[in-house]
Image (cartoon, rainbow, N blue to C red):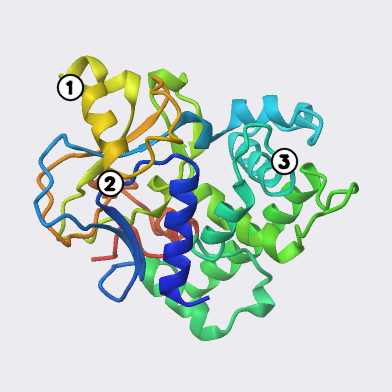
Amino acid sequence: QSSASQDLALESWYKRHGIATGYVQVRTTEESVGGRGMFWSSPKAAKDAQILARIPKRCVLEVSFARAKWSEAMNWGHINDKNLEMMASTMCAYTQTDPAGVDWREWIDTWLGFGGVMPRPLKSYSSKEIQYLATASGSTFADVSVAIELRYNTMKNDATKLEFPFTDGAKGMTGDIFADMYSVVVSRCAVMGPAWDYGYGIIPMHDMHNHPPPSIESSVELHALGDVKPHIEGLDDEVTNLIHLSGIADISPSLDEQDILIVARRDIQPGEELFLSYRDASETQGLSSNDRLWLLFQYGFPLFPVE
């Protein structure tokens, strides 16, 4: 598929699943800091606190929901790490049928290959690749080499804990897909607010926003409808209008306090890329070269460039 057709396919998936995108568009373009991102396509500027998108709660890949839906598909009792729980949830979504009718596999296929640095053996790296990681994180060549091996071995151990591969028919879940998924899940996982009891999950649309460059302020935030309703007058009407604008009124589920909203945190100009802060800038204080390296592995780019 071409880049344009991939973006149209993703937007079609959003619409079929009742996600209200409004004037937010996904674009694969050199204008995006990550090569692919979310853009504000309205001819008018978005205002601070404006609701830009709504994702129904059934389209949130959240751990407790996954455990309930696919209780027999995974040995959940042996998984006691939050990242492994999220990985197990994604594996189930990719290989199992969802009784709620969400086509998770089609969505997951759109973000495979767009995550962090995929774990692989040290021998598969060139000296140039290792030196880039060292320079970008402020680490030494030797320290990067050790970290690459550690990360790859950790993934293999986690695969064992998750009992991969499946014995009841992998359904296309290959080793390469597992490794790719493993690198993406950590970078895409979000901790949600009180309406979700601070659970964690991966959320359509939210997962496509890039982290802002140092010179640009982040422009959007993630909130559950129930968490912001007391603070935004006429919220239900605003979200309902957004649903009609998106052309999905006939298929959109009823509003729910666990619906996820993408909200502007400042004014956004027409054509501007939408940015979501992955980590607060204050977290640059005291970061070691090792911390920077692991963030580079997690996100696939230098989150806080070395000065």
- The image position of residue 166, as x and y in percent, is 84, 49
Residue 158 vs 123, above or below: the answer is: above
Q: Quick one: SS at disc 3? A: loop
- Of tags 3 and 1, the one toward the viewer is 3
Q: Quadrant of residue 232?
A: top left
Q: Quick one: SS at disc 1? A: loop
Residue at the location (12% across, 43% down)? Answer: 266
**Amino acid at circle 2:** Gly
Q: Quick one: SS at disc 2? A: loop
Residue 197 vs 144, above or below: the answer is: above
User: Label for residue 232?
Assistant: 1
Residue 218 vs 72, above or below: the answer is: below
Q: Quadrant of the C terminus?
A: bottom left
Q: Earlier in the sequence, mark 3 or mark 1?
A: 3
Of 186 and 270, nearer the camera is 270
User: Label for residue 90?
Assistant: none
Which residue is the site of mark 2?
Answer: 22
Which residue is the site of mark 3?
Answer: 97
Q: Earlier in the sequence, mark 2 or mark 1?
A: 2
- The image position of residue 142, as x and y in percent, is 54, 72
Residue 185 vs 31, above or below: the answer is: above
**Amino acid at circle 1:** Ile
Label 3 and label 2: CA atoms lie apart by: 29 Å
- The image position of residue 207, as x and y in percent, is 42, 49
Tags 3 and 2 touching, CB below 8 Å: no
Residue at the location (38% across, 23% down)? Answer: 255
Question: Badge 1: few (under 14), some or many (20 or more) residues near its Cα, within 10 Å?
Answer: some
